[in-house]
Image (tube, rainbow, N blue to C red):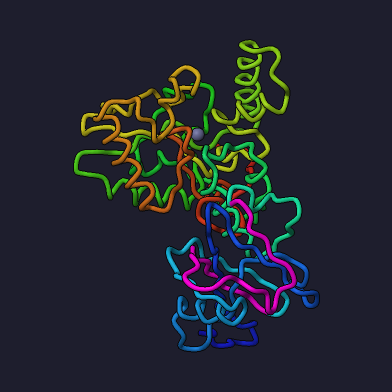
Amino acid sequence: MTAPDRRGDPPTIPVVAAAIERDGRVLCVRRAPGGETGGLWELPGGKVERGEDPRAALQREIAEELGCRIAVHAEVATTAHAYTFGTIELTTYRCTLTEGEPRLREHDDARWVASSELLEHADLTWAPADVPAVRLLTVAGRAEPVLMADPLIASIGVQECGEPLVDLRVDGAVASTPEQNPGNPFYAWLRRGLAERLVAAQSALPDGLRLLVAEGYRPYDRQVAAFEGHRRRLLDDDPTLPHDESHLRASAFISPPAIAPHVAGAAVDLTLVDADGRQLDLGTVIDASPEDSDRACYTAAANISAEARRNRAILGAALSGAGLVNYPTEWWHWSYGDRYWALLTGASHALYGPVDEPLR
Ligand SMILES: [Zn+2]
């Protein structure tokens, strides 16, 4: 349905798109020349008519555009994108062919592309509105977690919303400890939106459990020192490691400074404590490296105790439920509003960029 046109605002146009999947590949189509998105690649689909069910609209559009029938499965993402002609609200679904073979009627080229290569395929320039969903499909198609130094992350823009950092210690709702960070006087500071979501997550925990924040905001120079220190350790172990490879592997443990979510006040390292303030068993200490822990620091690791797995699940349910996302190589690292959050939620951009030190 088209939203009412208030005070001359351009209307929001509901659009649906199909990620038609077959044998690990996704059907990509190119728009014919002309208009703002002519010549760009997209997932096929089109506008939802007034009063029409979005999934039915998608089946109708695919029948019209490609002459075939599809089954519509789970939603990939819904994202808004402003073109000059108005704002598109695009919902993308995973789909499969049920009848017929796609034949181009409106588009001028088509490819079946491996989902792990969708966004970065050299021959495909995507229509901007499609990018968040295509990025999510690319992530889902990868065998390994996307690391912070991956070009997929750097390709996500930031539209700084200007929200302040707040000190978690002021109202004390969520516990924090400087134990981990004796050199960081700002360890308990976070963007307000993240701090509020932590309070919500904590209230969703089973009785008697609380969150314990080990580090939130981290000044830029500390991030540089920590990243370079870890990269040097990797190079000490293997001096033949190429620069790019050491950069990527170090980012499995700590973010490259230019895109670091802690430097934006958008990420938090935390664990669970009981009513007496004792830390629960989460399988490894916070900041265990993949090398030292045999990858037990990976959130989905199997080489931890059943109790630790249970505790990770409790932590994850509360934080995911409050809108945070986890960095899959670190069970303790959660974020909101940073590039990794945009990656995993299908947001078109990050909300928080790097910030100068808060006033003391
Ligand atoms: Zn972290």
Write the residue at 51% across / 51% down: 344
Q: Magenta stretch containing residue 100, yes or no? A: yes
Q: Magenta stretch containing residue 107, yes or no? A: yes
For the stretch drawn in magenta, the main secondary structure is: strand
Residue positioned most to the front: 100
Q: Nearer the viewer, residue 68 or 224?
A: 68
Note whether residue 127 is visible.
no
- Kindly indicate the quadrant of the structure image that contains residue 229: top right
Q: Is residue 230 above or below residue 86?
A: above
Q: In this view, does 69 lie above or below 284?
A: below
Q: Nearer the viewer, residue 163 or 124?
A: 124
Write the residue at 80% across / 77% down: 34
Quick one: quadrant of the C terminus?
top right
Q: Nearer the viewer, residue 83 or 214?
A: 83
Q: Position of residue 60 (x, y in %)?
A: 52, 82
Left or right: 170, with 345 as reference point? left
Write the residue at 65% across / 51% down: 156
Q: Position of residue 50 (x, y in %)?
A: 50, 88
Residue positioned most to the right: 34
Q: Nearer the viewer, residue 164 or 78?
A: 78
Q: What stretch is highlighted in magenta?
A: 86-114
Note whether residue 346 is visible.
yes
Left or right: 19, with 228 as reference point? left
Q: Position of residue 17 (x, y in %)?
A: 56, 70
Q: In this view, does 57 lie above or below 290?
A: below
Q: Where is residue 336 in the image (x, y as percent from the top left)?
A: 49, 49
- Kindly indicate the quadrant of the structure image that contains residue 263: top right
